Structures are given as C-alpha cells and as structure tokens.
C-alpha cells in the first residue's frame, strides 16, 4: 500500500500525503518561532512532541543528504538552526542541548 496517499487526521487536520504533513509541521515551526524567537524546538517539547521530533528529523535528514534543497531553503528562510551543540559550546545561530531538554508547556502552541 502506498503510504504517500493515505489520509490521516493529524493534530485535527486531515493530511493526505507526506508533503502536506511536512507543510503542516513547517507551519507549526513558524508559529513556534513567532512565539519563542528561535527555531530551537526541544526534541521532547511538551507542548508539541511531534514538532520537536520533526525538527530533529529534519536535522538528521539534512546531515544524511536526504532532505531536498527546496526544503532546506524553506527552513533557512525562517532561520532554522541546523546544529545542536553542548550548552557551553553554543555560538550564535546554534541551539544547545539545554534547549533540547523539556521546557515548560506553552498552551498557545498545542496542536
């Protein structure tokens, strides 16, 4: 069966394929950045665990050469942070592992 054509209800939105799911998560990332000021979504973000996992997956896919240039460019337009460093090694534009730990719940970003 072709998973790319299976409709699913995700976060209360009907998603028909993986491109729509990617766009849905991208829009959640934009909302996160508007609320928090950066794209350093913790991997285990309590307000939206799916977004945190998705952000981490984009980093892994890019590192492994499996993320399209179009998606890399889109993520770059919102200031996506590609690297995560140890908290004492962070440079501007990087997330640190402290940011990747659980943060307080933010009801405005719940899906």
Image (cartoon, helix red, strand yellow):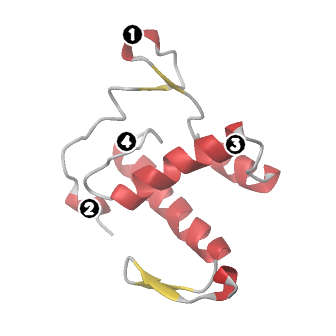
Q: Quadrant of residue 37?
A: top left
Instruction: Give the residue at x 26% y 61%.
Output: 108
Residue 88 is labelled as 1
Q: Which residue is mark 3?
A: 62
Mark sitting earlier along the chain (1/2): 1
Q: How far separated are the C-alphas under marks 4 and 2?
A: 16 Å
The secondary structure type at the circle numbered 1 is: helix
Q: Residue at x 60, y 68 (%)?
A: 23
Label 3 vs label 4: CA separation? Answer: 18 Å
Q: From this viewpoint, which residue is outermost toward the top?
A: 88
Q: Secondary structure at mark 3?
A: helix
The reply to whether residue 78 is in sight is no
Residue 77 in picture, x, y percent from top left:
66, 47
Label 4 SS: loop
Q: Residue at x 31, y 49 (%)?
A: 45
* x, y percent for residue 90: 47, 16
Q: Are marks 2 and 3 in contact (CB under 8 Å)?
A: no
Specify whether 73 is left or right of 78. right
Q: Residue at x 21, y 61 (%)?
A: 107
Q: Residues within 10 Å of mark 1 (few under 14, many from 20)?
A: few
Of the two numbered discs 4 and 2 on the same chain, state the one appearing first in sequence.
4
N-term mark: 4 or 1: 4
Q: Which residue is mark 2?
A: 108
Q: State how far apart marks 1 and 2 are (Cα).
A: 30 Å
Above or below 25: residue 2: below
Question: In the rendered view of the protein, which quadrant contains the C terminus?
Answer: bottom left
Which callout, 3 or 4, points at the residue further toward the start of the chain? 4
> What x and y, as percent, mark residue 31?
43, 58
Mark 4 — residue?
A: 42
First in sequence, mark 2 or 3: give its number: 3
**Marks 3/1: CA distance?**
24 Å
């Amino acid at each position: 069966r072709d998973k790319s054509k299976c409709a699913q209800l995700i976060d209360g939105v009907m998603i028909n394929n993986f491109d729509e799911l990617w766009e849905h998560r991208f829009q959640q990332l934009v909302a996160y950045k508007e609320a928090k000021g950066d794209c350093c979504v913790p991997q285990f973000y309590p307000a939206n665990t799916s977004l945190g996992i998705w952000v981490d997956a984009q980093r892994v896919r890019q590192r492994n050469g499996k993320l399209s240039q179009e998606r890399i460019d889109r993520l770059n337009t919102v200031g996506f942070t590609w690297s995560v460093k140890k908290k004492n090694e962070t440079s501007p534009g990087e997330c640190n592992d402290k940011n990747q730990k659980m943060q307080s719940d933010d009801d405005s970003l719940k899906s």
